Image: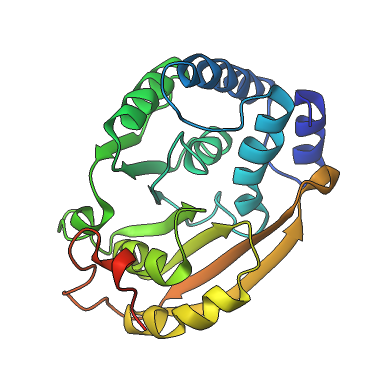
Amino acid sequence: MNPEEFKAELQKRGLPITEEKMKQFADYLKLLQEWNQKINLTAITEKEEVYLKHFYDSLTAGLYVDFSQGVHSLCDVGSGAGFPSIPLKILYPEISITIVDSLNKRIKFLEALTTQLKLEGVHLYHDRAEIFAHNKAFRESFDVVTARAVARMSVLSELCLPLVKKGGKFLAMKAANTEEELQDANKAITLLGGKLTEDISFVLPHDAGERHIVMIEKRKETPNKYPRKPGLPNKKPIK
């Protein structure tokens, strides 16, 4: 997907792309490629692959959630090189973005990126999600929490649902078939105060693979003991 195809696809889908935003995506690609020579941010670095499998893939969330209405704050857990939150921030600049990542070198890249793209209202934290979610300033405070291909649903639910405010949404963006994962995660989702509302499946343009967006609504407060200590959700998922 070249930049022209990227722009045309977003316009066709009714997503708010402009020439200024296209320039930001071009700068994003350039900085990603430069930094990726120094630190391992992504295995996907070719221009057309980045536009399709990182930029467009991140923005598919905007096809199913109206980020221009009622979404004021978004937290991205394990964002890596900024996906999906930075593409969403470019498209919806009024949203306040918080990114949590356990690797400081990725946070350094994101600091350089947000400066380069002149993005305001982006807050970056070098922290483990298990610790960050117990911070009273952030716990149960976000309208939307996202995670993209970070871990299995049972683990993701424990890391992310404690950050979602009651009535808010947790969006898990997955590549693989999610049916089995959701069966395993059913107890965790309920225990942590969530309710699975939809598992949306679709195929990226150019037959670039199946994708899922799992939408979980926060119905109740998460018990204080969750998330458990760093590493424990992954070692011993809730079952």
Question: In the rendered view, does 158 fall on the left or right side of 126?
Answer: right
Q: Nearer the viewer, residue 239 or 31?
A: 239
Q: How is the image coloured?
A: rainbow
Residue that lies at the very extreme toward the front in this rendered image: 235
Which quadrant holds residue 220?
bottom left
Residue 206: x and y in percent read 84, 43
Q: Residue at x 51, y 14 (%)?
A: 34
Q: Considering the image in quadrants, where does the C terminus appear? A: bottom left
Q: Nearer the viewer, residue 88 or 78?
A: 78
Decide: is 201 above or below 192. Answer: above
Q: Residue at x 74, y 27 (%)?
A: 48
Residue 204: x and y in percent read 76, 49
Residue 124: x and y in percent read 30, 36
Q: Nearer the viewer, residue 101 or 142?
A: 101
Q: Considering the image in quadrants, where does the N terminus appear? A: top right
Q: Residue at x 71, y 37 (%)?
A: 52
Q: Residue at x 46, y 18 (%)?
A: 35
Question: In the rendered view, does 163 fall on the left or right side of 26?
Answer: left
Which quadrant holds residue 187?
bottom left
Which quadrant holds residue 3?
top right
Q: How many marks?
A: 0
Question: In the rendered view, does 235 fall on the left or right side of 205?
Answer: left
Residue 177: x and y in percent read 65, 67
